[in-house]
Amino acid sequence: MSAIFGEALTFGQASGPEVVLRVFGDEHYARYESLDGYSAVYDDEHGLFCYAQLSIGSFRSSGTPLSETPPSGLARHLQESQETIARRANARKLERAAMAGGHSADEVVRTIGPNQGLLEGRVLSIGAIKGLTILVNFQDITSSVTRADVEDLLNGENYSRNGNISSARAYFMGVSSGKLDYTNVVVGPYTLSRNREFYVNNLLVEEALTLAVDDGLDLTQFDSRNENIIDALNIMYAGQTQYRDNLWPHNWHIDLTFGAMRTNLYLLTSLGRSVGDLSIGTFCHENGHLLCRFPDMYDYGERDGDSIPSAGIGSYCLMGSGNHNDSGRSPSPVCSYLRDLAGWCDNQVELDTAGVKEARHGDYNTVMKFRTSRANEYFIIENRARMGPDRGLPSSGLAVYHCDILGSNEWQQGTAAKHYQCALLQADGRRDLEQNANRGDGDDLFGMALGTVLSSESVPHSREWDGRESGLTISDISAPGDVISFHCGESAPVVTVAKGSAKPKLPIPDNTRQGVSSAISITQSGTVAAIKVAVKIKHTYIGDLLVKLMSPSGVTTVLHPRLGGSKDDLTATYSSEDAGVLSRMVGQSMMGDWVLLVADRAWIDVGILHSWSVELTPAPQSLTLVAGNQLQKSRRDPGSAAGQGKREEMGRSRDKKVSKQSRRKGKSNGRRTRAKVVVKVK
């Protein structure tokens, strides 16, 4: 089953040139529009697409070809009623069921998988499977694509022609971790007996297979289980894909017998006009049904008791609309939900235990699963960075799927009774896929983020479909890449060190009690568990200096109590880890202005507060991050002594310089002559 969502495609006309139309729908029901928005129907009497008119909720041909001016008063974007759509789709299903020997249509095209999440029927997802691919031309349409071209497309080891990411065989070998080796024997091209238009309403499968058998083809080579059943029958017809009735690409049952061999499922798709039309997307999607019994992961709009369209899993899986990624040349990998059902994942990473996990891109042999209170319902996480086979995705990051093998990707409601079989939790919380707004966008996957991004209270949330808490919590996601790390389970507080620095370059007044001050503003909240302060002061006699630190709450501690005598320059780091140093600051509030106070308490020698910094480690139990996680800033209050000193420094001349020798005049025998100063430390 291959659905089309508004793509502009080329169609043949029996009585006119090709026409380009936008298509909406699938092989059971589709609507066509001209590029300027007028609904169209194919008029068999005229052999042309004509403007559609509505009559009691149903389309009828106006008889006016699209090449002419539309009838007067005709509205654009006409649509048939839901009753008509359902009636036409059901009629089409009955017709297909009759051709399939009574098989129910739902056995092939359901969006719910009744067989433990898969469709009913023969599952051929593991082992060496040899398929049969028959190429056919029409009497009026042929293709320049050769058998060798198709053999390369389907079986090539390093196929990249026309921009394809790989051959079909390499695609399935990759996503199955080598468990499905699917090759194809290609025969033909054979020429059918009629023009292409005839086969719009008449299935060509039996005629094509008869031509191959009459050419001497041995069908027993396509029976891997010795059940006298052809495992995989693919028919590719010449020309561009015709999204009309029996020529619409599809996968279905057909009951034909050739000697001891009989048919089961078949795929019909196009060959293209030239090698430039070849792509693997649709072939891989339909063989996902045929071989693996994967259900469709998108919404048909009128199945499983639901008539409201949605996008299902969108572009994020081959069985959604991902077969169309990069025009079918980079089909999305099969999502890990379906890979797990197919038995392709040898490694299971249980996410029920808390800790840091790593999701590796392209590790198709692993499924990362979080189980809920129900065996049929769980969450799966995988790395979908936009690279390699994922290069055609609209988003890049961590994908989180809410899975239920009893669900249906027809049910976009998200309720306990009606929910998807595999729902992508879209990181932006908009639920665009459920609302049919798009097939995926750049905000769907979880990118790099600190803190909790998914929990029972977040948007989107991780609650079970009935609303109960699942217990799944995800936090601290790393950037998209080959490996994405994340924390699963209740998030341990992240200890984020707050840092700030300042370079005030303030002159320190000689022999004053007030001195200068410099403030660093910390915007991270919490309480101090550890603190470091680094100070750089240019001064010719550090024994003159009294250096203190004041917390935002006004608590003050002395860092440098006039020690060091005649030594030059104070460059030091103080830490609360050192006994007795900065111990008063442990437990203080982090947020606010931390102020360094520097005073010269003796005459003669002067200096400059060059720079300083503070580093605060928060206590884990009190950690809270403000918006932006951590904002670091050094600030000087223009009204403070530091600000005033800076303005004075900029405004006055520094022409007068006194040598170190003259500044130290009066020193004798290690003693200094100076006025007595009384120092009071507050």
Image (cartoon, rainbow, N blue to C red):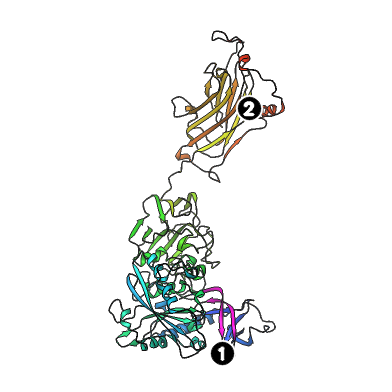
- Picture quarter with the C terminus: top right
Say what amino acid the circle numbered 1 marks.
Asp
For this view, does 437 lie left or right of residue 263? right
Q: Is any part of residue 114 visible from this angle?
A: no
Q: Quadrant of residue 219?
A: bottom left
Q: Quadrant of residue 632?
A: top right
Q: Position of residue 144 (x, y in %)?
A: 49, 80
Give neighbour class at mark 1: few <14, some 14-19, many 20+ (Cα, 10 Å).
Answer: some
Say what amino acid the circle numbered 2 marks.
Leu
Pointer 1 residue: 44
Give neighbour class at mark 2: few <14, some 14-19, many 20+ (Cα, 10 Å).
Answer: many
> Which structural element holds mark 1?
loop
- Picture quarter with the N terminus: bottom left
Q: Position of residue 298 (x, y in %)?
A: 47, 70
Which of disc 1 and disc 2 is earlier in sequence?
A: 1
Pointer 2 residue: 506
Residue 270 drawn in magenta? no
Image point (51%, 67%), residue name: 326
Q: Magenta stretch mostly in which secondary structure?
A: strand
The stretch of residues the image draws in magenta is 3-27
